Image (cartoon, coloured by chain):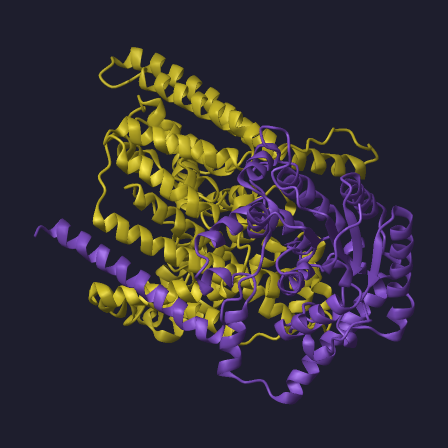
Amino acid sequence: MTDEAKRWRNVAVTAVCALATLVAVDQALRLVAPLKPLLEIDEAMEQYERGDPTVLVLGSSHARSFVVLGRQLAERTGGAERLQPVPVEWGKYTPYLWTLEHRIAPVLEQTAADGRLVRPSLKRVIFVTEWWDSTTLDIGNGLLTMALPARAWQWKDFWADVFENNLTSFNQNFLQRVWRGLWPWSVLVQDRGHENVAGAIRDALKRPDAAAKQAVYDARIAEWQKMIEGGVDRICDAEQMAALDRIVGYFTGRGLEVTMLLYPRKPGTLTDKAKATTLARFSLRMKAYADAHGLRFVDQTSQNPLTDADFADDFDHVLPDGNERWARWALDGALAFLTKGVAR
Amino acid sequence: MSLAGLEMVFFLPLALAAYWLGPRRAGWQNAVLALASVIFYLSWNPRLLAVLVAAILASYGAGAWLGALPTEGLPEAEAGVVRRRRRRVLTLALVAQLGLLGVFKYAGFFADSLNALLGAVGIDGALPILRLALPLGISYTTLVQVGYLLEVYWERAPACRDPLAYGVFVGFFPQLLAGPIVRARAMLPQYLVPRRLAADDVAAGAAALLLGFTMKAFVADWLSPRVVDPVFAHPATFATRTLWVGLLGYATQLFSDFAGYSLMALGTGRLFGLALPENFRHPFLSKSLAELWRRWHISLNTWLFDYLFAPLTTGRSWFRGRTGAGFLVVFLVSGLWHGATWTFVLWGLAHGVALAGHHAYDGFYKGLCRKDRAWVARRKSRGYGLASWVVTQLFFVLTLVPFRAPSLAAAVDFGKGLVGLGGSGRLAERFGLQAAAITLFFVAYHLLEVGPGPRWLQRFRDLPAAVRGVAYGLVVAFLMVYTPLGASTFIYAQF
């Protein structure tokens, strides 16, 4: 073997061992921070294309709770009612509108050669929202600005933006998504930006005591309470409401029955002041909006069977058990109409 | 696009595949590099690509013109005429290159400064202020081209006859953002011959990329938002200790950001079979400013000393033999090169004065040594070495205050705070494991150059390939967990 051949062998062995180590570490990290696959727009639209649903749910990440509700609905109706959630992470009405126009509408309107709809079953739409969606509030770390490229764009949207604005930190978020999509099984890749692994390692090295954990919990509850109380002057922003008009207009224009549902919030984050100001005003505004546009209106913000323990560590999303309970409760009550047909 | 960005994961393999899987001809390889460099440039600012192309064509043409005017072997009378013609060509080419840099980078600064001066004597807003977007890497590409023109003019390097090779020599994408500033004699011959894929290049390139990324993304990008930016944003509000932490953090960040990116450029170059010049050599080990500038941003400093200092102090002007004055000019230019603001001028002035002072002290000390050999022993003692290191590093770190401060007023506030005349604020975040890991990495990186360090490094290199592979795999896994998201800005790209 020549010297150069030996060097190439060394390089190859080093690379293979490095890759094997990476895979082994990745697998080991699953034990401390298991992967939590989440429904995203791409997958949701693929399911829509395959499933021809009768109910479409459009909303932020909260729409993922309807995966459970959809399953229960299918069980109750023997599969006659098929519900498809499309969650737009960090959503506001403007990104919902973008997703509707660029991702949902082309699938919904697709026709066969004879001009008939390829997927004709859709009868109902549930628009899931909360006060925050209607504001221009960001949470201060620019996450909102990356929502569309990171969740909803396709390659054509990426290239169009690159040709218009060069490569920017905004459109680079699409590449993050492509990168993640290449390694769906990897904790190391999927954890970027979430820091679950770093947190789990930190906790394993130095387990926080109960008092410290409680102090962090209390501080975060206080932050949430302050944020919700502070939203009172920001709700129903004109730009967001204009986007809502177009969303509702599109669905009602297609003869679909639209329900506006205000999503449940973690009880501990809702102060009496918030209930009397931000949340009450938002509920009233949306009720009036629904009445004016002929929509069904369901407010579950604080009227629901969930407790603080049903919410995840992010204080925002409902845990699997909570989703099951909430879905049963909702299908028995305010969303029972989903189990029945639509009078046209 | 940048070498540390995620887009490189898609871009680099494509460029490497086209480069190595195509015909093994210099023309093909240069064409691939040119296309990759154009795409890299376009991703920043497509409109200003024309400026770079025009500058490259102008310097290539001027070089070819100079090459067509040789003086060797000519009778003296004829040689004199040709020399005068060569000088005119060079002057024209330098005016074009430096003029371009002047318009884009300095027009606003000089107009601003002149207006302020005129304003002081009662004349308001006399000059219009030009605010132009800076073409990517113009500070680097200008020096590369000026260096080439001087080499050809001095007949130390032949004029390049291959426009594609020359274009890539100036605009090779890894060196566009933050150098290194390449030299014609070392680099052009590499572009003129077909390159061969060698195992050593792949190994060295990958190792440099990994180390560079660690320095850039893990160290610099962690320090910036947590330690450096808050302290420099409101220096008057922070306590003395916090300001010192911020300043030391900035020294670490600046080095890691710049040296890290330079290493990534070197590593990328090696993957294409090209040896770019080293840009940093453990500068925080330096025991004198002269040594520090031989270890920090080596390609810029050797450029300044070869093409400015040497002609200045060995030519026929007033500067001949006046080394101290030469230092002053070199560092004022260096300051202005780093940025068109008075804070950079102040930084350059401080280093010029200090180097001139150190040069004078060195001369004085050598005189003492000649009289009494005991002074030689004193200079070699541990105490002298330690004191030299402390003074050198302290001076360097302190001069980073005007280098980083957004204005002279902020620099003064920072300076006051460092000596206890500031506020009492502290950084909001408490730093734990990661700060310790960064400090450990930074110290270990420098220790690998001294004492038993090189031996340890060699021992690691001598380990079986499989063991080294496991170590690299663990480092990559560590980086994937702990590197901050969005590590994408470069301090030295702004220069």
The residue lying furthest to the left in this view is A1
Which of the 4 image quadrants contains residue B193?
A: top left
Can residue B110 be seen?
yes
**Along the viewing direction, whichever of B307 and A42 lies nearer the viewer:** A42
List x then y, in percent, for residue B261: 44, 51
A288 vs B381: above or below: above
Q: Is residue B107 above or below residue A212?
A: above
Q: Quadrant of the C terminus of chain A?
A: top right
Relative to residue A206, is residue A311 drawn left or right?
right
Q: Is residue A257 left or right of residue B485?
A: right
The count of marks equals 0
Of residues B477 and B247, which is closer to you in this image? B477
Rendered shade, chain B? yellow
Dividing the picture into quadrants, the one containing residue A337 is bottom right
Q: Position of residue B269 (x, y in %)?
A: 34, 43
Residue at 49 percent of width and 48 percent of height: A178
Q: Position of residue A309 (x, y in %)?
A: 69, 79
Q: Is residue B370 visible?
A: no
Residue at image coords 32%, 68%? B450
Observer-nearest of B154 and A265 = A265
Q: In which quarter of the view is residue B303 placed?
A: top left
Residue at 56% from the left image edge and 57% from the top image edge? B400
Percent of width and height locating residue B10: 43, 44
Chain purple in the figure, letter:
A
- Left or right? Give the position of A93 relative to B180: right
Relative depth, front residue between B264 and B403: B264
